[in-house]
C-alpha cells in the first residue's frame, strides 16, 4: 500500500550541513529487553542476543549516554545487569509501561511491593544507575495490551506510589492518542513532581506539545515523530530548551527511502554496515532494526525542520537530557 505523500509547504527545504565539531549524544529511550535485541523477530529466532554490540557502536558514534527503558517489573534485573558493568554510559528507568498495565493490575499489592523494592535497591547502588521513574502513562493506540480503564488505574497507582515514596527522580512518561486523559491525570500531581520529567516519543500537535511544555515537561522525539504533517509542525515548534532526542530502538528507524530522510539526511554521515537478520554478524548492524548509533539522524531531521544547525540541536538535547536525568555529570558544568 502506497504511503500518503507529506505536505512540505512552509517547512525549510534545505538539508542541514554537517556539524562543525564532534558532537555528544544521549539516547534517552532504548528498550534493551525487546525481542529484537535477543535475536527474535515475529516469534522466530535468527541470531544470538547482541545488545552489548549496539552499545559499542553507540560509543563509536558519539552516543556517550544510553537510557534503558523499564517496561515492567521483569526488566529491572535485566537492565541493571547491562548498566552495572557500564557505569557512566548506561542508565535505567524503572516503572510499568501502559502495555503492561494489566500485569500490574493482576499482580495487585504484591506486584507494587516488588516494584518498590526493586527501585529502592537500585537507588542504593553506587554509582546509582537510576535516571527516572517510568515508563508510565497512557497508550490508547494499543488497547489490545490493556483497556483504557486498566491503563488509567495503573498510571494513577504509579503516580501515587511515586508521591508516597518521595523519590527524587524525574518521570519518564508515555502519552499516545490519550492526550486529554493524560493531561487531566498528571495535572493533579504537578505540585508533587518537582523534577517533572520527559514525555518521550511524542506524537501529536503543536498545541498539545505546548500544553505539555506549559506544564513543565520536556518533549522527546524520534522517528515516530516524523510520520505526518501535524507531528512535523510539532517538532519544528519545540523550544530548544525543552527538546530531547532519542531512537526508541529497536523501533523507530528513519528509513533511508522515506520523504523526511530524502529531504533532510542528504549530508548525514553513512551508517555502519549492516546485514540481514539471517546473515547476522556481531560486527554489523541488523538491517531494519534501529540502534543508538543512528541517533544523529534524528538530530539532522530536527535541525532540518527547525532550519537550524545540527550542532544547535545536539548541544541543546545533550544539555537538557544530562541535566534532567543527571547522567553521570555531577562534576561537569555543562
Image (cartoon, grey):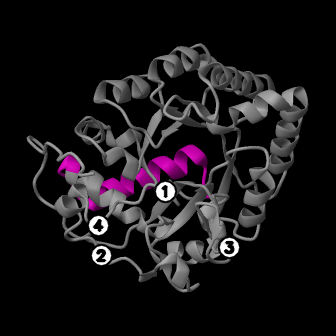
Between 220 and 290, the residue placed more toward the observer is 290
Left or right of residue 68, residue 117 in this image: right
Crowd band around label 1 with a 10 angstrom C-alpha radius: few (<14), some (14–19), many (20+): some
> Which is more N-terminal, label 1 or label 2?
1
Left or right of residue 310, residue 330 in this image: right
Magenta stretch: give its range: 305-328
Disc 4 to disc 2, C-alpha distance: 12 Å
Residue in the image at 36% along x and 73% along y: 22
> Which is more N-terminal, label 4 or label 3?
3
Which mark is nearer the camera, 4 or 2? 4
Task: Write down the quadrant of residue 94 in the picture.
Answer: top right
> Which is more N-terminal, label 2 or label 4?
4
Secondary structure mainly formed by the magenta segment: helix
Helix, strand, or loop for circle 4?
loop
> Contact, CB < 8 Å: mark 4 with mark 2?
no
Helix, strand, or loop for circle 3?
loop
Mark 3, residue position: 49
Task: Write down the quadrant of residue 255 in the picture.
Answer: bottom left
- Mark carried by residue 256: 4
Residue in the image at 31% along x and 46% along y: 227
- Mark carried by residue 251: 1
Mark 2, residue position: 269
> Which is more N-terminal, label 2 or label 3?
3
Disc 3 to disc 4, C-alpha distance: 25 Å
14 to 120, vertically: above or below = below
Res. 7 visible in picture: yes
Disc 3 to disc 1, C-alpha distance: 16 Å
Provide residue 265's location: percent of width, then percent of height.
24, 65
Crowd band around label 2 with a 10 angstrom C-alpha radius: few (<14), some (14–19), many (20+): few
- Mark carried by residue 42: none
Which mark is nearer the camera, 3 or 2? 3
Helix, strand, or loop for circle 1?
loop
Amino acid at each position: 500500500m502506497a504511503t500518503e505523500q507529506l505536505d512540505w509547504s512552509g517547512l525549510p527545504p534545505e538539508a542541514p550541513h554537517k556539524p562543525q565539531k564532534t558532537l555528544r549524544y544521549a539516547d534517552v529511550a532504548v528498550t534493551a529487553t525487546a525481542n529484537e535485541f535477543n535475536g527474535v523477530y515475529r516469534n522466530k529466532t535468527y541470531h544470538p542476543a547482541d545488545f552489548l554490540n549496539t552499545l559499542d557502536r553507540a560509543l563509536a558514534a558519539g552516543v556517550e549516554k544510553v537510557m534503558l527503558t523499564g517496561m515492567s517489573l521483569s526488566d529491572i534485573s535485566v537492565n541493571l545487569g547491562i548498566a552495572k558493568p557500564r557505569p557512566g554510559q548506561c542508565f535505567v528507568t524503572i516503572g510499568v509501561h501502559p502495555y503492561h498495565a494489566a500485569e500490574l493490575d493482576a499482580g495487585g499489592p504484591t506486584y507494587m511491593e516488588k516494584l518498590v523494592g526493586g527501585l529502592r535497591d537500585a537507588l542504593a547502588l553506587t554509582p546509582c544507575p537510576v535516571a527516572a521513574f517510568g515508563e508510565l502513562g497512557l497508550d490508547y493506540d494499543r488497547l489490545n495490551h490493556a483497556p483504557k480503564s486498566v491503563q488509567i488505574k495503573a498510571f494513577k497507582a504509579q503516580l501515587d506510589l511515586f508521591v508516597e515514596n518521595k523519590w527524587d527522580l524525574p518521570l519518564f512518561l508515555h502519552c499516545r492518542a490519550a492526550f486529554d486523559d493524560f493531561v487531566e491525570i498528571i495535572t493533579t500531581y504537578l505540585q508533587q513532581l518537582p523534577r517533572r520529567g520527559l514525555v518521550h516519543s511524542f506524537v501529536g500537535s503543536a498545541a498539545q506539545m505546548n500544553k505539555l511544555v506549559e506544564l513543565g515537561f520536556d518533549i522527546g522525539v524520534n522517528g515516530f515523530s516524523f510520520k505526518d504533517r501535524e507531528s512535523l509542525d510539532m517538532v519544528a515548534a519545540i523550544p530548544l530548551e525543552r527538546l530531547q532526542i532519542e531512537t526508541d530502538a529497536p523501533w523507530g528507524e528513519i528509513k533511508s527511502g522515506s520523504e523526511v530522510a530524502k529531504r533532510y539526511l542528504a549530508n548525514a554521515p553513512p551508517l555502519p554496515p549492516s546485514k540481514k537478520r539471517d546473515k547476522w554478524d556481531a560486527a554489523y548492524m541488523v538491517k531494519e532494526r534501529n540502534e543508538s548509533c543512528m541517533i544523529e539522524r534524528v538530530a539532522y531531521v530536527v535541525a532540518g525542520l527547525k532550519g537550524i544547525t545540527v550542532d544547535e540541536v545536539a548541544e541543546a538535547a545533550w544539555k537538557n537530557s544530562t541535566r534532567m536525568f543527571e547522567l553521570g555529570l555531577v562534576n561537569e558544568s555543562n
